[in-house]
Amino acid sequence: MAHLADGGWIARHENLLMTGPTCLGKSWIACALGHKACRDGRPVLCQRAPRMFEALALARGDGRHERILKTIARMDVLIIDDWGLAVLTAPERRDLLKILEDRHGRASTIVTSQLPVGHWHAALARGHRRPNPHRSDPGSPRPQRPQRPQRPQAETHRRKHAKSRRPQLNP
């Protein structure tokens, strides 16, 4: 991680993809790298993917769409957080393609996602994805723990032998 803190990857216009289960610290690391880039005087934009697509949809309706895409393209670092939580619509897929095309070789992009990279093509190409067993419910702040097994209600070996070892009181 120390080699990322120097910012050389930004000067080389390299991108970062961070994937893994929820609560791993992907967003925290992405924001820390963005904060360091800001302190180095670089323009940075950090957006959660669902919010970014909502803003672009609204901008498409009121005529600001192209201006927002140009603003995104001018940022030295773009952080797209929580990509792949929801199925992308056709306009959202086009917006993402336009953003990535405009930035390719010109600026750096950080993408964080709970969706494994191997599932990205299916999510983009067909607009749907296979369920990810490593991802918790998007509304859940923490990973779901497996259910604790219920104790058996039947008589166990220990209980059977414990009854037979009890001393019998003869009156």
Image: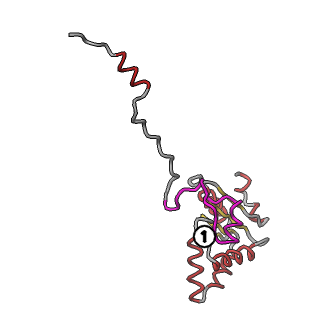
- 104 or 22: nearer the viewer: 22
Identify the residue shown where x is 65% and y is 78%.
90
> Was residue 54 drawn as part of the magenta stretch in this picture?
no
**Element assignment for label 1:** loop
Give percent across and percent down for residue 20: 63, 54
Circle 1 Cα neighbour tier, 10 Å, few/some/many (<14 / 14–19 / ≥20): some
Going by the numbered disc 1, the residue's amino acid type is Val
Give the farthest residue toward the top: 171
Q: Which residues are magenta?
A: 114-139
Identify the residue shown where x is 66% and y is 75%.
93
Instruction: Left or right? Give the position of 19 relative to 147.
Output: right
Instruction: Left or right? Give the position of 141 relative to 86.
Output: left
- 78 or 152: nearer the viewer: 152
Q: Is residue 149 above or below residue 3?
A: above
Dominant secondary structure of the residues highlighted in magenta in the image = loop
Instruction: Left or right? Give the position of 156 relative to 11.
Output: left
Count of picture labels: 1
Give percent across and percent down for residue 36: 65, 61
Q: Is residue 46 above or below residue 118?
A: below
Q: Is residue 136 above or below residue 168?
A: below
Q: Is residue 91 above or below residue 39?
A: below
Instruction: Left or right? Give the position of 18 relative to 145.
Output: right
The residue carrying mark 1 is 87
Image quadrant containing the C terminus: top left
- 7 or 57: nearer the viewer: 57
